[in-house]
């Protein structure tokens, strides 16, 4: 095997940024294709100019169907503007608050890490090799702070760009639905791809440039360099936390308010323009599921890369200064961008969707194709970038690893991700028996629906946990903590495709809302509903990926933290570790309680406002008067900004307080405890919510004989299903997805502050 055919340093240095640029260019191409759908009404005369791009025929069809209606297009454009403005203004408000926090936390990082050697500028002995001299702790403090800010900014930009493209594409998807479900699908999917590729490529490019700039100062001191880089992951995730929690509270306050008054009390459809909360609800889909999800997966990607680089820097790659082997994690991500690029063409260019039932299979094929191609890609990278045998640092000893073993580590993570995706799909799609059973239980009312839904969520944890367990065992046995970090990167290597599928969901959801609000025909609404139901399932798959990768990432970070803080074993029976474990396991519950209560109290205000408008605005119910959308948007914005701070503070302060007062052993316990309980709650919450949502959609669509016996809209079983869906909203869109950030964020923060905790931590135990 390899050795002779290894990539040269120069090739590596060119290859990584080139792949990132290809990703960015590809996303811009997709964006230009989406922008061909015009949101202005044009008169189509029969001059030959209009026949270009072969679109001549489409106009004729539209004319026949009488759909080329001036008012519909204008209305769609208006609604899209309202949604886009709402989302932009919310994100700007959120980022102002988060910006203050970011600066404050950056100062904290500098003070804590600088104080390790009391701000001296002298070189110090290296952590892992006492005989060599490394750069001073002050340098780590400065560079960690810089990389923290870079990660935070990249994360914010990723979320913001994703939100922009989603609000740009939603009305275009609605208009394309007039030509058929295939055209609408391609528009929604392309827009998702814009976000996926921008995010994957940006994350890779910024990380790569940062490493090269830091290298100018650090030179051969890989250890110090990559310790400073860990701030990048911390920045990415801390922004993601606020994006996820803030966006999640926003979207669900609006959604629950709109559902309870609109569907249950007033018996009007979900996205009826008479409902005052309807714009806020559609804005919420973008700020929570797009901006939040984007920041979240970017955080995972940044952290798993950082964890892998930290462990590799103290292994033979770092000791022998093998730049190509050192960049193995970045090369895997570069290969991922190329693989996802080919995969995306399968959905948009190689095959065309003709019928509604082909939507979900097409999205599932994306996952399978990207996984199969990526397996080959990993093999190529492992053969070209790694020496045939090398050593990996494993808690004080160097462990010999072969390059095929590392290939298996990445591969097992990649396939575990696929398994988690499919299990999630089985439990949340209304094509299978679990969701159909939940729908069936609605016959006897809301209570049985809730019982069945909860049981489904708990049961859906089993297989994903085994998949994660197997990948942990395999990757740890082969390559210690480096193996686990690489398994996490393997799961995230197809992030561009995963995010495209994920962003497709909220875009289709919005498209349906716009169709309803613009008063389009029932046929078009059926098409957008079909896109949306598939989107619900894919959103659940995306959350499954995010949770699975979070589990592996935080374990890898935990390992890096243990090495850095010089803990060789974590003894569960030691009292200071055990109290950490039990408190750590409690944290996800505390966090979920905070986020769910926030949704509840914000929804309460929303329900009161919607009721007030229905009762006091004359002619609103008859559709003669316009509701006051702006007040509802404001309620959601204010509530989410105010309510995102306590849960955020809980997550960010816990490691600092525990590490400083109780020391590294207790902190290790807290990290292990929160990882173990957080994963379970996150998976069950996300899947329960997804199942309830699709059970409701199953009854509404009435596609099968069984579904018809439960429907139509407004029947008793349907009302029970709506209640289940409303309970599931905060579970699947606020608490569940935010938990994976809690797990990762505490681990990466502990790693960044490890030098401080190792030197000055455990104040309480020092007193006694």
Image (spheres, grey):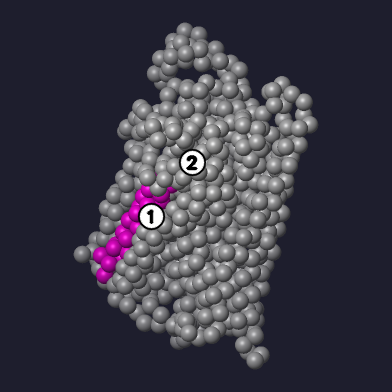
In the depicted structure, whether residue 610 falls above or below residue 452: above
* Quarter of the rendering occupied by the N terminus: bottom left
Residue depicted at 37% across the width and 45% down the height = 433
Residue 759: % across, % down: 58, 83
- Where residue 757 sits, quadrant-wise, is bottom right
Residue 166 seen in this snapshot:
no
The label number, if any, that marks residue 420 in the structure image: 1
- Relative depth, front residue between 287 and 451: 451
In the depicted structure, whether residue 358 falls above or below residue 441: above
Q: Which of marks 2 and 1 is nearer the N terminus?
A: 1
- Disc 2: which residue: 443
- Relative depth, front residue between 446 and 465: 446
Which residues fall within the magenta stretch?
402-429
Residue depicted at 45% across the width and 69% down the height = 555
Q: Is the magenta stretch mostly helix, strand or loop?
A: helix
Residue 362: % across, % down: 35, 38
- Relative depth, front residue between 308 and 629: 629
- Where residue 419 sits, quadrant-wise, is bottom left
């Amino acid at each position: 095997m390899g050795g002779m055919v290894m990539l040269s340093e120069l090739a590596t240095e060119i290859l990584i940024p080139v792949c990132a640029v290809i990703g960015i260019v590809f996303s811009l191409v997709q964006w230009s294709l989406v922008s061909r759908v015009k949101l202005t009404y044009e008169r189509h005369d029969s001059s030959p100019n209009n026949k270009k791009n072969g679109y001549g025929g489409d106009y004729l069809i539209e004319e026949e169907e009488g759909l080329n209606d001036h008012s519909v297009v204008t209305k769609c454009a208006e609604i899209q503007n309202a949604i886009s403005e709402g989302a932009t203004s919310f994100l700007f408000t959120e980022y102002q608050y988060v910006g203050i926090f970011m600066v404050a936390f950056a100062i904290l990082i500098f003070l804590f890490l600088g104080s390790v050697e009391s701000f001296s500028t002298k070189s110090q002995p290296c952590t892992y090799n006492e005989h060599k001299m490394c750069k001073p702790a002050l340098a780590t403090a400065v560079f960690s702070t810089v990389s923290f800010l870079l990660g935070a900014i990249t994360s914010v930009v990723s979320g913001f760009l994703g939100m922009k493209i989603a609000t740009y594409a939603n009305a275009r998807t609605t208009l394309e639905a007039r030509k058929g479900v295939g055209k609408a699908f391609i528009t929604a999917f392309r827009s998702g791809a814009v976000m996926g590729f921008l995010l994957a490529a940006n994350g890779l490019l910024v990380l790569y440039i940062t490493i090269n700039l830091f290298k100018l100062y650090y030179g051969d001191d890989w250890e110090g360099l990559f310790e400073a880089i860990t701030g990048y992951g911390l920045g990415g995730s801390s922004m993601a936390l606020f994006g996820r929690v803030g966006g999640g509270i926003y979207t669900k306050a609006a959604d629950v308010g709109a559902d309870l008054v609109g569907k249950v009390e007033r018996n009007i459809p979900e996205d009826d323009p008479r409902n005052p909360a309807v714009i806020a609800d559609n804005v919420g889909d973008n700020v929570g599921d797009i901006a939040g999800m984007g920041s979240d997966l970017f955080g995972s990607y940044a952290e798993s890369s950082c964890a892998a680089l930290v462990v590799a820097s103290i292994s033979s790659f770092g000791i022998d200064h093998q730049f190509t082997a050192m960049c193995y994690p970045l090369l895997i991500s570069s290969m991922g961008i190329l693989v996802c690029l080919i995969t995306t063409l399968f959905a948009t260019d190689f095959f065309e969707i003709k019928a509604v039932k082909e939507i979900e299979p097409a999205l599932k094929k994306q996952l399978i194709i990207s996984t199969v191609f990526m397996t080959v890609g990993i093999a190529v990278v492992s053969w070209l970038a790694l020496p045939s045998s090398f050593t990996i640092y494993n808690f004080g000893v160097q462990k010999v690893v072969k390059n095929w073993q590392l290939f298996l580590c990445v591969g097992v993570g990649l396939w575990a991700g696929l398994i988690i995706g499919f299990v999630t799909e089985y439990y949340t799609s209304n094509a299978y028996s679990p969701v159909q059973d939940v729908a069936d239980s609605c016959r006897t009312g809301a209570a049985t629906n809730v019982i069945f839904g909860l049981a489904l969520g708990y049961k859906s944890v089993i297989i994903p946990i085994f998949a994660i367990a197997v990948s942990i065992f395999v990757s740890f046995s082969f390559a210690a903590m480096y193996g686990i970090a690489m398994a996490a990167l393997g799961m995230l290597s197809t992030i561009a495709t995963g995010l495209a599928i994920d962003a497709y969901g909220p875009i289709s959801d919005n498209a349906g809302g716009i169709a309803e609000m613009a008063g389009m025909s029932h046929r078009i609404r059926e098409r957008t509903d079909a896109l949306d139901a598939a989107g619900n399932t894919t959103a659940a798959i995306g959350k499954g990926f995010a949770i699975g990768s979070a589990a592996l990432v935080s374990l890898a970070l935990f390992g890096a933290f243990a090495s850095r803080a010089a803990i060789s074993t974590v003894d569960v029976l030691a009292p200071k570790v055990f109290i950490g474990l039990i408190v750590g396991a409690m944290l996800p519950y505390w966090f979920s309680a905070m986020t769910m209560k926030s949704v509840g109290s914000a929804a309460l205000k929303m329900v009161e406002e919607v009721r007030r408008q229905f009762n006091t605005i004359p002619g609103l119910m008859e559709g003669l008067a316009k509701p006051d959308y702006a007040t509802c948007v404001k309620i959601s914005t204010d509530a989410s900004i105010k309510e995102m701070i306590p849960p955020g503070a809980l997550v960010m302060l816990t490691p600092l307080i525990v590490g400083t007062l109780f020391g590294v052993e207790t902190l290790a316990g807290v990290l292990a405890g929160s990882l173990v309980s957080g994963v379970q709650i996150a998976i069950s919450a996300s899947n329960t919510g997804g199942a309830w949502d699709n059970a409701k959609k199953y009854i509404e669509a009435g596609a099968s004989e069984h579904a018809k016996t439960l429907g139509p809209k407004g029947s008793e079983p349907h009302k029970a299903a709506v209640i289940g869906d409303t309970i599931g909203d905060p579970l699947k869109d606020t608490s569940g997805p935010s938990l994976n950030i809690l797990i990762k964020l505490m681990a990466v923060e502990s790693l960044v502050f490890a030098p401080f905790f190792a030197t000055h931590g455990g104040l309480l135990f020092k007193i006694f």
